[in-house]
Image (cartoon, rainbow, N blue to C red):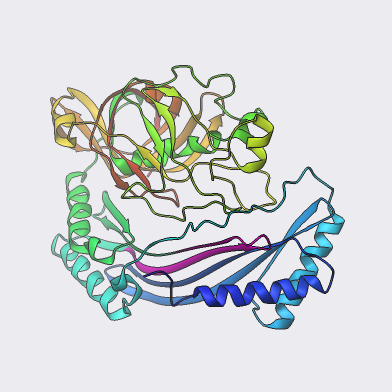
Amino acid sequence: MNESELLPRKKCQELFLAVEHAARRASISDIEISLASTADSLTRFANNEIHQNVSERATTLSVRVIVNGRTARASTNRLHRDGIQATVDEAIALARASEPGDLLPLYEDPTICDSHHYSEAAGSCTPAQRAAGVADAIHIVEAAGQVAAGIYSTAQNVEALLNSRGLFRYYFDTLTQFSITAMAGDSSGWAKATSPHYEEIEPVGLAERAVRKATRSRDPQEVAPGRYTVILEPAAVLDLVGQIFMDFSGTAIADQRSFLNDRLGEKLFGSNITIYDDVAFPLQTGPRFDGEGVPRRALKLVKEGVPRQVAYSRAAARRAEAEATGHGFPLPNELGEAPLNIVIAGGSSSLDEMIASTPNGVLVTRLWYIREVEPFEKVMTGMTRDGTFLICDGEIAGGLRNFRFNQSVVEMLRNVEALTASERASGEEAFDMIAPGMKVNDFNFTEVTRF
């Protein structure tokens, strides 16, 4: 399969020609368009019944022009001639009104950089199929005397990028998501999974996991806040460690807003921490090109605790006398670039082995409401939720009232005692990440929450 029926390559080329024709009327020759087309279907459930089923299909055209060293962008979903002409005119007007900058020419590369992660089953999934999966999951939760809420969604996505230097990039995928929370009075349990492959999502298995967590955390006890040995499941690792990667950016370093300023090459984390950015990693997804069409390169962000590489857009690479890595955001933007396909190398421990080796500690399923408190040590605050457990003498002793934490991620990654194998993790963040579970010493809980 080399193209999607949702937005075929031929349609992309036709839209580019229409934009090019509209721009030439204003004597503008440097143009770039990006196209995003989605077909999303969502089944939502609560109180053990489906209460919403919606589908949406949309295509957005974004036009960027360069006019005398100035650039600007305008977008539309009106793909007829008048809509395209109005969008081109708006982009030109915005460019002429903007300040001139030290712009690079449009990226020029004739090589093919197309890719896809597509599941026919996800692309053709019907509301009845999703409803059947939800019904099976609700049956598991009801049988345990609990109440279920969550979502089951399937989506098709296409991204394309074309410019007047002959560039044409094309990517399409599917994504299936299932998330469920099981509620049991004074406790709750949660599970979530995502995959480009519909057949890899198992609503019954996820429901069983959520039920087990809700059951084991009933009648939660309250223990004093403080520093504990904490076992973070992969979703919680994503939620917390995922906060630091915007700093692995040449632009952020040049702007003096990265915690890596004057720290590249310094050992910041434990020797067991190695982190990559690799769009080609088997469990990762996403286009193999960035917002300007530059092919994404694999990066070793951290090697054995030492930050080694950061992402560079074309502009950031020129300023730093480095090579662009294919991680730039669409121009114009203020952020520059960031790694988006994070892979944290795992270890050889299992979750059960981590628990068994912990005399006194806390097991955390997920985190939420995370905010940055201090940027240089990446101190974050947030709360645990949906499955927080006390560990005593190597066993789960029962549920705990949830905690608020105030924790430096830099310090946390110095205190990792053990790692599970890595897996595709989904959490509070909008993106997924390949992450292990972590056993962390001296994790700082500051107070017990009301929830």
Snapshot quadrant of residue 147? bottom left
- The answer to whether residue 448 is seen in the rendering is no
Is residue 337 found left or right of 57 in the rendered image? right
| Residue 378 coordinates in the image, percent (x, y) | 51, 28
Magenta range is 150-171
Snapshot quadrant of residue 376? top right
Residue 351 higher or lower than 146, as above or below: above
| Residue 88 coordinates in the image, percent (x, y) | 75, 70
Residue 176 versus residue 402: which sits nearer the camera? 176
Residue at 27% across / 34% down in the picture? 346
Residue at 21% across / 59% down in the picture? 207
Snapshot quadrant of residue 312? top right
The quarter of the image holding the N terminus is bottom left
Is residue 421 found left or right of 240 in the rendered image? left
Residue 68 higher or lower than 41, as above or below: above
Residue 120 higher or lower than 296, as above or below: below
Magenta-span inclusion, residue 161? yes
| Residue 8 coordinates in the image, percent (x, y) | 49, 75
Query: How many numbered discs sit on the rendered protein?
Result: 0
- The answer to whether residue 56 is seen in the rendering is yes
Is residue 79 found left or right of 50 in the rendered image? right
The quarter of the image holding the C terminus is top left
Magenta-span inclusion, residue 255? no
| Residue 204 coordinates in the image, percent (x, y) | 18, 62
Residue at 27% across / 56% down in the picture? 183
Residue 103 versus residue 403: which sits nearer the camera? 103
